[in-house]
Amino acid sequence: MSVDPSAPVDPSASVDRLADRYWGSLLALNPSMATVYGDERYDDRLEDPSPAGRAAARSLAERTLAEARAIPADGLSVEERITRDILIVINELAIEQDDQRFDLLRVVDQMAGPQTLLAQVVVFQRADTPERVDRLLARIRAYGPYMAANADLVREGVRRGLTPPRIAAERTIAQLERMLAIPIESAVIPSIVQVTSEADRERIRDAVWETVYPADTAFLATLRDALPATRTDPGIWSAPGGDGLYRTQIRAWTTLDIDPEEVHRIGLERLEAIQTEQRAISRAAGLGDDLDAYRAALVADPANHPATAEELLERAREDIGRALSVAPRMFGRLPRAGCDVRAVEAFKEKDSPFAYYFPPNQDGSRPGTYYANTYDLPSRMYSNLATTTYHEAVPGHHFQIALEMENDRLSTFRRLGARIAGGAYVEGWGLYAERLADELGLYRNDEERFGMLTGQAWRAARLVVDSGVHHLRWTRDRSVEFLLRAGLTETDAIIETDRYITMPAQALTYMLGQLEIQRLRRQLEARDGARFDLRAFHDEVLGHGSLPLATLARELPTWVPEPA
């Protein structure tokens, strides 16, 4: 790792001032992220994936890292020490990934690739005044150069031999073909944009036709040209320097320096323990230890399936309401922001997971949003929906992220940006929340509890298949088969496998994060005995924003004081 020794260093600067400077510069380099958080300053532009944009991001990382290291840790407050930790972790990893040119792999992604950005960001961008409409039109026009720069990355990857897995390229090509087949009259962006007049919508439709369709057509052609050079072996081990790339991605997603073999072992052990719990439910239903028979009974039960997409969404809204009503038993602080429920947009539902969450904006004018996927509705079951809702919404990501954003004791960077280093904390909390929902009595019946355990088994299986694909050289089919045995439907097993292939190590964040939170809870319960205060524990886990797991483990026991 190289850090420019001539970069300006101000040892006397406060950590918070450094963090504020870093966050402001990061938003300028990532304007769509600024829009998602309600910052409108950069609504007229998109990210710059060109060599100039990459150089600017590299310079910011090197400068911030040097300044953070120059600030002595001794004498800092707890929150300042955490902020310094986070800045160092984020920027060390940014430089390491830039050295490895991971951007050449990230550019082809059926879930979060560049072709999805504009359609996603307009959901959050207001266009309700003439000035805001003009900014959106400028952003749409910027899509042409943006996609051209991404096409350059694809071609550079081919020249370097650093290409994406073929299944990711094939899925992205198919997604672009579907998007381009949509008539402009029904195009996604003009249909969902937040305008106040049809005249403005028509201006946006014209801009999309003039810029977005040609840019996507050109990017599609680039992907088709690159397809023969993509990797037929799905694991990142098959890329040049693949073993090192995987270990970096494990640290980038989890902040843990853990061996892939250890990840695989933990996954197998946790999966067996969870399936033991599932077998107890199956026996109580008179089906013995035959988990496949129990799953088949859930699939065959008409009452376990929504008849319409709206029924699925309404059930999610009901579960959120029930969770909110009992949350004060386990939490002293509750978020002010509400949580809406929406269906995943049609253009990307085929490539998206069962559900995901988007945060509220900074000023509280937009609530958090829980997206539920209604694609292939016959495969969706209420027994799986409940645990997913508690993970993504309440008391899971919505509580964790909304409380973080509303925490006035934290700097803007800590409230909004620390998730860059806290992926395992964030997803670990979501998975922990699924178990917590059981403690709160939120699951209506054994079927929903079995669904919760299926979700737990799925995350344990993720440890197995992610390390299997990217380290042990598993095939795509072997991953799908393993997930089917762990209880996923065929639709989800295929979508999830292709997600793991495209995003190495992201799948590890859930179970590894949950295990660390559970370990800390057991540690404090043993320390405090009957006087252990679970509400205080949860308030402190969520009271300092997103954290690297090592930081959480070091600091949490001091935040939850021993009872007098």
Image (tube, rainbow, N blue to C red):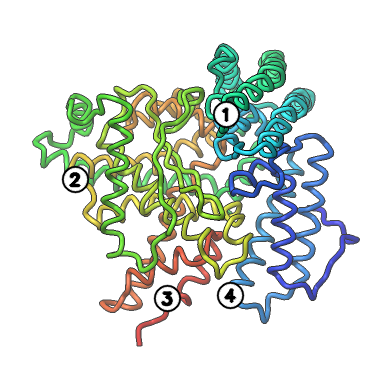
x and y, in percent, of residue 119 in the image: 58, 30
- Numbered tag placed on residue 78 in the rendering: 4
Amino acid type assigned to the residue bearing label 2 in the image: Arg
Q: Mark 2 or mark 3, which is nearer to you?
A: 2
x and y, in percent, of residue 341 in the image: 39, 40
The residue pinned by badge 3 equals 560
Mark 4: secondary structure: helix
- The residue depicted at 70 percent of the width and 70 percent of the height is 15
The residue pinned by badge 2 equals 444
Sequence-earlier tag: 2 or 3: 2
Q: Residues within 10 Å of mark 4 (few under 14, many from 20)?
A: few
Q: Mark 1 or mark 4, which is nearer to you?
A: 1
x and y, in percent, of residue 318 in the image: 27, 43
Sequence-earlier tag: 2 or 4: 4
The residue pinned by badge 1 equals 197
In the rendered image, the residue lying farthest to the left is: 286
